[in-house]
Amino acid sequence: MTNFIYNLIFFEKLGEKGGEKHNMTQEVRVERIPWAFIVIFLVLLGLLGEIWNVTQATGTWQRPAAYFSSLGVTVACYTALTALPFLTFFICGALGRLGPLKGKVNPTTMTYLYVMTCCASFFLGRPTADTQCAAWASFIGSRYLNPELSEKFVPWFMAPPLPIADQIRLGGVGVPWSELVPTIIFWSTFTIIFGTFMVCIATLFRRSWIDIEKVPFPHAVSAHELMKRVDPTKPRQAFNITSPFVIGMIIGIAYSIPSMMIELYPWFPDIYGFRTNICGYAATWNTPTGALGGIIGLTKWNIHPLAVAIAYIAPLNILFNVWFWWLVDVIILPQIAYVMGYYTALTDRSGCGRWDCGAESLAFGPPFKWQATVIGGIFGLALFLFVIERRYIAETMKIALGSVSEDKRSEIERNEALSYRNLYAVIVVLFIMMVAILMTTGMGIGTAVSTPISMFILWFAQMRMLGLSGAYVRGTDKGYALQKMLFYPTAPDPPTGDFIMTANFNTWFTDAPDMGNQIGGNYLTAWQSYRIASLTGVSNKSIFKIMIVSIIILAPTTMIGFLYSAYTWGASRLPGTWGMWGCAGWYQRCAVPERWNAMPGTDPWVPNFLAGFLMAGVLSVMHARFMWFPFEPVGFIIGTSWTSAQAGFWLPCLVAWILKILTIRIGGSKLYEHQGLALAAGFIAGYMVCIIPGTIISKIRFFYPF
């Protein structure tokens, strides 16, 4: 089976008939990939990058300024914007003008580096150990946090035995590599299978989203703006100090330096309000005694300008819909419900507790149960995307089945990474492998089949959100809906192995691109890499191969890097290890009855789910059929979800909407394309460049506290 996939991906032998090569009417240039460099680079990046990223002096809990050292996800975690690609562009852009590397760094090599570092960013995650400890490492923690359940339900190959696992808590010991080999092999295989599946799904829809619809993917656009200006093959004038990009970059640097000082030195004045009533993603929360405490739905508002810069790149109608639906669904409707007798307990809570704490919260409590509504909207968006894409899907299937002429097939597949025949074959084989590997963990056939389907539906819709708005719905309770409807409406007592594994995989593995073994992260990497390739002209075949190799290498090397760090310094010293230190992320954060039974809403929650499903469907159809219709589903989902209510993204969208309206009315699309976009991308680049000294300082601070 491994050889089967290898041949399909790298050689496509199975697509040839009778040993004859396909007659391509137009040849597509395929670059010579520097595999030796790529392999060495990825190995070092996975090992050293993981060690570097988890050895932080503090975590990010209620500390937005602590993101000054992150190589992976930035403070705007709900946007999945990552730092490493930008940092790499700065470094290789400079080195490409010097000595032996002069003339060897060009847009093609920078595109390769983007693919690898974007993929690595999600393996690294936030500047903590959250990414590992909310996924595979929590199974190690289960050995000593829930020893009886773990011994009964966690197979030997998913985590080492208790005596070996227990050493990771305090560290200070040699890494027991021989006992950890089965765990590394299992979880690496798991990540590679699921990651390759998601890359293949993105590859299947690439032509529709990237070539035909031209979905923007704002993060890729902002990265490309930096790439153009640091490209060493261009004259230095391309980085003109008076240009809007450089001005934006200067503003970003000027903002970031005080932020870094706020985190490093307690005596530095808190000019940004980063030390009071704030979450790690820079969202300030409402207080019961504050002037706005009486507004039930006003939970948080985000104060970080990085979010505004990201939002500014998104389309105007998306920005409008985000803040409009937040105003209607989170502010106006709950206030009316409050007058009618609902949400009365929320007046004594801060903004954090109002959204998702308990059965009477805005997210889970009646009458709206917004989390169930939002998840229904995500499922609805996915379904209606399939409806809209039905002709494209039918066309690719006809090509795969050989129902079109050779000339037409050759023309359509000319820019594809794989032929559609081979692509569908790989997807089917990988799906079977996903089901099989889930069943080895103790899951039954039903839950093992439905879990990958649920992951696919949720991430398919989430990529549409990220591609249009630059944000997504972060949260650990999106995957429960399908499993509760089909298998476990309530948590069984006593718990079963199938239930615990189903709860775990549908909690963390649908949460965020940087969580859950990077299932969503590898999917997003594929989309953003194809978007960058469309701007630089790099072959999609090369992009596909580098993505697959990146996953194959980063899966085990980042695990090894984390295990070395945890056994050397102790999981208790590394920030973000809550999933394996004090809280059993494997069980307590997903499978306990009080959590499972309340998600995604208190019973009955299915009507709210169906309402969100239908709302997304109606908005999808109306927006697709009528150009004048102002409402669409992406803004509805983001505006009503955790992203706006808890991360406070509604405010950056409102500010960006106003700024973009002014830009276009003053100078039209030309002013936006040549000045506004460059200014926003420059601010993002300025924020990123400050991470270079910041991450160095963080290492000094970890080993020599000050």
Image (cartoon, rainbow, N blue to C red):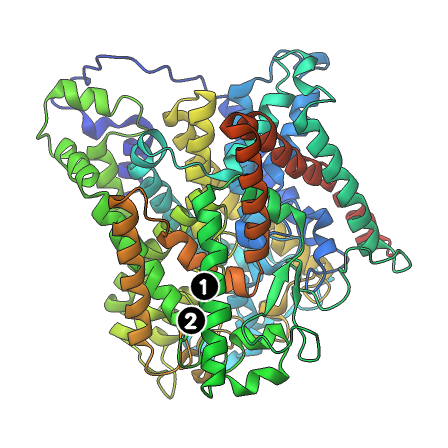
Decide: is 704 above or below 230.
Answer: below
The C terminus, quarter of image: bottom right
Disc 2 packing (10 Å; few <14; some 14–19; many ≥20)? many
The residue nearer to you, when weighing 608 against 110, is 608
Decide: is 33 above or below 649.
Answer: above
Residue 203 percent coordinates (x, y):
33, 36
Res. 640 mark: 1
- Residue most extreme to the left: 403
- Residue most extreme to the front: 666
* Residue at left offset 46%, top offset 84%: 594
The N terminus, quarter of image: top left
Q: Which residue is mark 2?
A: 370
Q: The disc labelled 2 sits on which kind of residue?
A: Trp
Find residue 626 and report its image quarter.
Answer: top left
Res. 50 mark: none
* Residue at left offset 52%, top offset 33%: 221
Decide: is 561 above or below 363.
Answer: above
Look at the numbered disc 2 and give the secondary structure of its residue: helix
Query: Does the image show residue 385?
Result: yes
Compared across the picture, whether 358 is left or right of 411 comes to: right
Marked residue nearer the N-terminal end (1 or 2) = 2
Q: What distance separates the C-alpha of mark 1 from that of mark 2?
A: 7 Å
Q: Mark 1–mark 2 contact, CB under 8 Å?
A: yes
Residue 561 percent coordinates (x, y):
62, 49
* Residue at left offset 69%, top offset 60%: 60
* Residue at left offset 51%, top offset 77%: 588
